[in-house]
Amino acid sequence: MVEDDRIAALFAAPSRPADEAFVLRVERALIAEQRIRAARQAGWRRFATEASASGAVVAAFLLLARLAPVAAEAGVAPLSPALAAILLLACWLAVEMRPASARG
Amino acid sequence: MDHETILARRAAEGDSAAFAALVRMHEARVRRFLGRLAGGDADDLAQEVFLKAWRMAGSWREDGSYGAWLMRIAWTGFLTFHKAHGRRAARDQAAFDPDALAVHRDADTAIDLERALTGLSERERAAALLCFGEGCSHSEAAAILGIPLGTLKSLVLRARAQLVAYLETGHG
């Protein structure tokens, strides 16, 4: 039908070779997305590790705090659990806050 | 097994070179379809379509063509874009952005097509673009748009009637 031919002509688009610039753009976006995903996973892993470590430290000092009166009765003068906790957290902060150039 | 299926399987296993080959094979069609629907945002949308296809590469089922699967992602991506940005903004950009029209290489033809499609709903436009512009069968276009075959045929008939009316007014 003539009408169908005219409609087809209206929609006709010239064939062209693949647009390599667009392919490259998609490839770069894909690489960027993979990097972001990897960084996010690493961030979550680090968070999980540090949260576990913090939990362990808190548990250790809770235990120390319970044991301290017993040690005092026995004539031993243990390091105050609170002071030890502050020292440990300060060390941790010092390690975490060091400049990126010093992290190797 | 055809070359496209082999590439799609490799892409599903994480082979980015195979996926790049698929992008090379299908980018023109996807960008043309989105360019005629969304205008100036077509390339950003097309990039999103391919990124989504990469993320979902494992979910491609071999009972349909990879190209049709991509077009389905393109259509759903366009609908999301359309909801977010509004029909008017998309239409305005399609009508006046020379970059969007340059997708067709021949800007006059693109402007003619845009005028011919003016007044059609998004689904009618998409149905016309798929059936008249991309050579999809009715069943393939229905699958891409996610609608029943009967609905697709009605959309195509309405679009065709408008296109014929446009051509008869002497614009074609």
Image (cartoon, coloured by chain):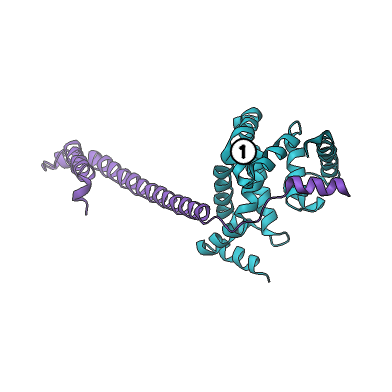
Q: Is residue B41 visible?
A: no
- Residue positioned 55% across, 48% down in the render: B47
Task: Look at the picture and state if B137 lies above or below B79.
Answer: below
Q: Quadrant of the C terminus of chain A?
A: bottom left
Q: Chain of mark 1?
A: B
Query: Picture coordinates of residue B38 (x, y %)?
Result: 63, 38
Chain A palette colour: purple
The type of residue carrying mark 1 is Gly
Please give left or right for residue A77 compared with residue B29 in the image: left
Find the residue positioned furthest to the front.
B170
Give the residue pinned by disc 1: B39
Decide which of A4, B66 is in the foreground and name it.
A4
- Residue B78: name its quadrant: top right
Please give left or right for residue B127 compared with residue A71 in the image: right
- Residue positioned 62% across, 68% down in the render: B6
Q: Which chain is cyan?
A: B
Query: Picture coordinates of residue B29 (x, y %)?
Result: 65, 52
Q: Secondary structure at mark 1?
A: helix
- Residue B99: name its quadrant: top right
Please give left or right for residue B106 compared with residue A24 in the image: right
